Image (tube, rainbow, N blue to C red):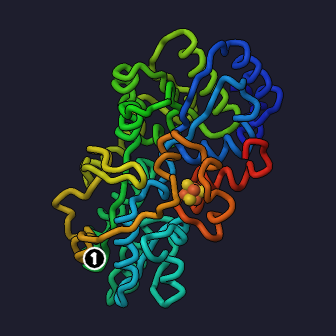
Amino acid sequence: MNKNFNFSTSFRNSQLVKGVVEEIKRITTKPWTIMEICGGQTHAIMQYGIDQILPKELELVHGPGCPVCVTPLDQIDRAHAIAAQTNVIFCTFGDMLRVPGSSTDLFSLKAHGAQIKVVYSPIDAVKIAQENPDKQIVFFAIGFETTIPANASSIIQAKAFGLRNFSILVSQVCVPPAMEAILSSPSNRVQAFLAAGHVCAVMGYWQYHPISQKYQVPIVVTGFEPLDLLQGILKAIRQLESGTHIVENAYQRAVSEKGNQAAQEIINRVFEPCDRNWRGIGTIPFSGMGLRSEFDEFNAEHRFNVEHIKTQESEICIAGQILQGLKKPYQCPAFGNVCVPTNPLGAPMVSSEGACSAYYRFSLNREEI
Ligand code: SF4
């Protein structure tokens, strides 16, 4: 790599960006629909207006890659039921505080006296458990393959320390089964995927080859800067225009075919594949990672007996259709009026990776909105 290359600016270099956009325009002859999986990529696309500089034939749709958005309502309600208990310190990432459940959110529970702590890592929650032996400490383990290794580490640490007051409420999901669910839906519109670079940094991209072949879709591992995203789109268009469908890696500086094998080992030591409910989408077989039976003592659902919870979804929120790329946030009647970040009706308006929040922050002045 050129020694003058600067990671913080070169991937946003306007001349380089223009060159790739020109090439995309030159080779695009038909309408194509491409889905970026990751909510971080959705925010970068909206922040830099990448969808605005592409040829009109190209449509970018936003996938179910926001971990907060896909956490199902029943698990949110379980979190609220546990957090409301007097002997519990409930630990969570900050994004979850305002996510609406059937009747409340963690922020309101905290205002009414529940002990809810924002942490940056599950390891922080283990430390809180060591410091508070008379309390039950519960960590809300949401997220994709990027966060699962740290969750696994927290369980291994808690077991090693012999902690009896630490548990996790698990809602972990994996990307490949969600891609298959989208592609096999009769209403699918997606013709190519930009796979999430950070997920592939952990898991590699070997799992994507069978999907690409079975559904005949190009899948391009893509990063998060403007130039990364445009390179991913360019590679996807080249394949679409030439009728090929393979997995390509446009994020080679961070991703290898096999990924981080130490991280994969720790995931598989603590968790195993299970069916998982995705908010707005439904149950996707083997799309989750649940605790192995030997770690069941750390399962908050069992410890607090909150398995049977009745939920009440918002009748207005169309998050499920947005997460499957069927609609855009501005097509929701509540967008920007009834539903705003300070009064969210659904998780995609709350999360820093949610599609509705991205459109609200970066595109309110656009013509189509
Ligand atoms: S704008 Fe609000 S109500 Fe509409 S889909 Fe997004 S989160 Fe749901």
Furthest toward the right, the residue is 15
Q: Looking at this view, name the residue that lies furthest to the left.
A: 293
The spot of residue 6 in percent (x, y) is 75, 37
> In the rendered image, which residue does mark 1 sit on?
163
Q: Nearer the viewer, residue 90 or 27?
A: 27
- Quadrant of the rendered structure where residue 162 is? bottom left
Residue at image location 61% in from the left, 47% down from the top:
331
Residue 270 lies left or right of residue 73; in this view the side is left
The quadrant of the rendered image in which ligand 1 is seen is: bottom right
Amino acid type for the residue under numbered disc 1 = Leu
368 on left or right of 300 = right
Residue at coordinates 62% horizontally, 15% vertically from top-left? 30
Image position of 251 with respect to 133: above or below: above
Residue 152 percent coordinates (x, y): 33, 58
Q: Is residue 330 above or below residue 230?
A: below
Quick check: can you spot residue 144?
yes
* Residue 314: percent from left, percent from top: 47, 64
Q: Residue at x 56, y 33 (%)?
A: 222
Expressed as whole percent of the image width and height from the top left, the position of residue 66 reads 51, 51
